[in-house]
Image (spheres, grey):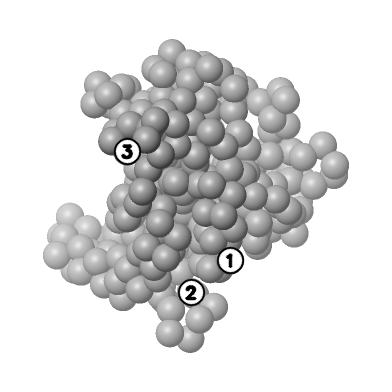
Amino acid sequence: MIMPVNTPSALRVATVQFQHRPGDKEYNLACIDKFIERARTEQVQILVLPEMCITGYWHVTKLPDEDVRALSEPLADSPSLRHLCARARETGMIIGAGLIEDGGDGHCYNTYVACMPDGTYHAHRKLHAFEHPVIRSGNQYTVFDTPWGVKAAILICWDNNLVENPRACALMGADIILAPHQTGGTCSRSPYGMKPVPLTLWKERDKHPEALRAAFQGEHGRGWLMRWLPARAHDNGVFYLFSNGVGQDDDEVRTGNAMVID
């Protein structure tokens, strides 16, 4: 990738995989704080956490409307966002994390916030949301400047599967794409895509670690990702910061494999 002459030769970034608890914001934020502290000791500049990691993810598909709305937060008055913005300002990092947004328009959104070192934030609403009838899709791309002279974009999970989305972000100047996911071990819409990983493999991971590792690295985990995600980075001349859940997520298993792709 050709970088402008006034940009740094390197950025220190970190992507995270962790197992959230469904609906337990206090626990999930406590986990996030631990990752922030570790990132600070490693002098990380951009920290990318998974999709909907504050609220939990797959259990939401089974919730009644009122429970989804109860999990949501308006960004203008969001305790979770205030906390992350304060941590970003304190550490000098960009911190990205996902939650359910109360849009104030009668709809909720699968939203990812990038909290900036100056205390501000950028929010991206997932363009192709499918998690729940009350969660509406967003309708615009999110590309923003960073303090280090490069532009970043946000695309959430399925947003990245469609080639037009990263291309549009690249044409808008993005050098880096923050790509929070909750994927792997799910039933892909593609007949040739990933399929579920048995829950028993996760529950018996201490007994059969090699079997779990093989599943996570195989065609329903990393193998699936590597069929298409590197092409998004290569074809558009961007770096991809892929984060993901890991472990049991309601009745599915997330396969981790957080990574940076160029």
Where does residue 127 sit, x and y in percent of width and height? Answer: 65, 56
Where does residue 94 sit, x and y in percent of width and height? Answer: 45, 29
Earlier residue among tags 1 and 2:
1
In front of the other: 66 or 232: 232
Quadrant of residue 195 within the rendered picture: bottom left
Q: Which amino acid does label 1 sit on?
A: Glu
Q: Mark 3 points at which residue?
A: 14
Q: Can you see residue 241?
A: yes
Figure label count: 3
> Between marks 1 and 3, how big is the CA–CA gap?
26 Å
Q: Mark 1 points at which residue?
A: 164
In front of the other: 244 or 55: 244
Quadrant of residue 227 within the rendered picture: bottom left
- The residue shown at (40%, 39%) is 4
Q: Is residue 189 above or below residue 149?
A: below
- Residue furthest out toward the right: 105
Secondary structure beneath dot 2 equals: loop
- The residue shown at (40%, 56%) is 237
